[in-house]
Amino acid sequence: MAQPKTGQYFDAAPESEDKRRTISVTLAGRHVDVVTSSGVFSPGHVDTGTAVLLRKMVAPPEGDVVDVGCGWGPIALTMAMMNPEARVWAVDVNPRSVELTAHNAKTLGLSNVNAVLASDIPSEQRFKQIWSNPPIRIGKPALHDLLTLWLGRLEVDGDAFMVVQKNLGADSLVAWLNSDQGPSQGNSGLLHTSKVGSAKGFRVLRTVRSSGS
Ligand SMILES: C[S@@+](CC[C@H](N)C(=O)[O-])C[C@H]1O[C@@H](n2cnc3c(N)ncnc32)[C@H](O)[C@@H]1O
């Protein structure tokens, strides 16, 4: 008997059919058409958590910034529109997401977006800012590894903004991020996370990397 297709949006190789469609959305105050597909996160609209994060944000700084887990690209595209001087890296484990973000950036004329597989980022690359709606559903150990990796790539004085659903453990995530078991330990104890916003059942978290001096 054939196996059911069980691909999840966060799989590196989603098995679901690649049904593309064009949707109209508003990003950075601009009405735009973007292409999405089955097998990527929130293909029909800008996710509520993502919208909560984007409403909170001001333009990213110029230089290297990153959207961790880009999906079809709402966060990366917004960053790129808000500051043409930002070099926006958009990363995902799902090649379909990377391809869609690259396609959408090109269609919108955003030459400052660089969409790549997370594994293709050079390990020495550092970022001034991270924006992310992280993949909470990959489970705690994998999420902790992911956050330790990316928060460790923040430049000194850089910061990360993440949106997390309250019901999916936003408050316990903050506690872990600031705990002895959290990513600060592998990063010289210089990361501090706080809640900077809250709406529609989501928390916006900010992690700051300090120099320690
Ligand atoms: C909650 S979705 C957010 C997608 C998009 N940023 C948005 O706001 O619509 C999280 C994304 O993280 C991706 N992801 C899962 N594991 C990852 C990993 N280890 N590294 C990078 N991205 C990952 C998923 O494929 C998914 O696209």
Image (cartoon, rainbow, N blue to C red):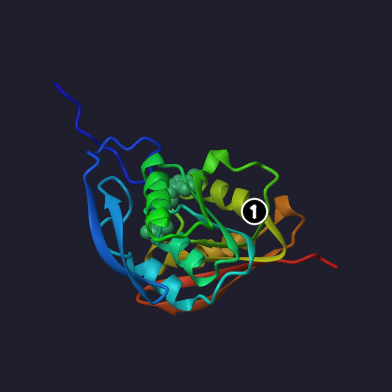
**At 70% across and 45% down in the image, what residue appears?**
124
User: In the rendering, at what x and y percent does residue 165 appear?
Assistant: 40, 66
Q: Which element type, helix, strand or loop, lies under badge 1?
A: loop
User: In the rendering, at what x and y percent does residue 159 appear?
Assistant: 64, 66
Please give the count of numbered marks on the rendered protein: 1
Q: CB of residue at label 1: within 8 Å of ligand 1?
A: no
How many other residues sit within 10 Å of disc 1, few (<14), some (14-19) or many (≥20)? few
Residue 30 in view, yes or no: yes
Quarter of image, res 65: bottom right
124 w.r.t. 181: above or below = above
Residue reaching furthest to the left: 1
User: In the rendering, at what x and y percent does residue 21 appear?
Assistant: 22, 52
Name the amino acid type tagged 1.
Answer: Gln
**At 51% across and 75% down in the image, what residue appears?**
57
Quarter of image, res 200: bottom left
Where, quadrant-wise, is the N terminus in this rendering?
top left
Query: Foreground residue, 191 or 168?
Result: 191
Residue reaching furthest to the top: 1
Residue 131 placement, left or right of 77: right
**At 52% across and 43% down in the image, what residue appears?**
118
Quarter of image, res 202: bottom left
Residue reaching furthest to the front: 109
Where, quadrant-wise, is the C terminus in this rendering?
bottom right
Residue 26 placement, left or right of 153: left
According to the picture, the residue beneath numbered tag 1 turns out to be: 181
Residue 137 in view, yes or no: no
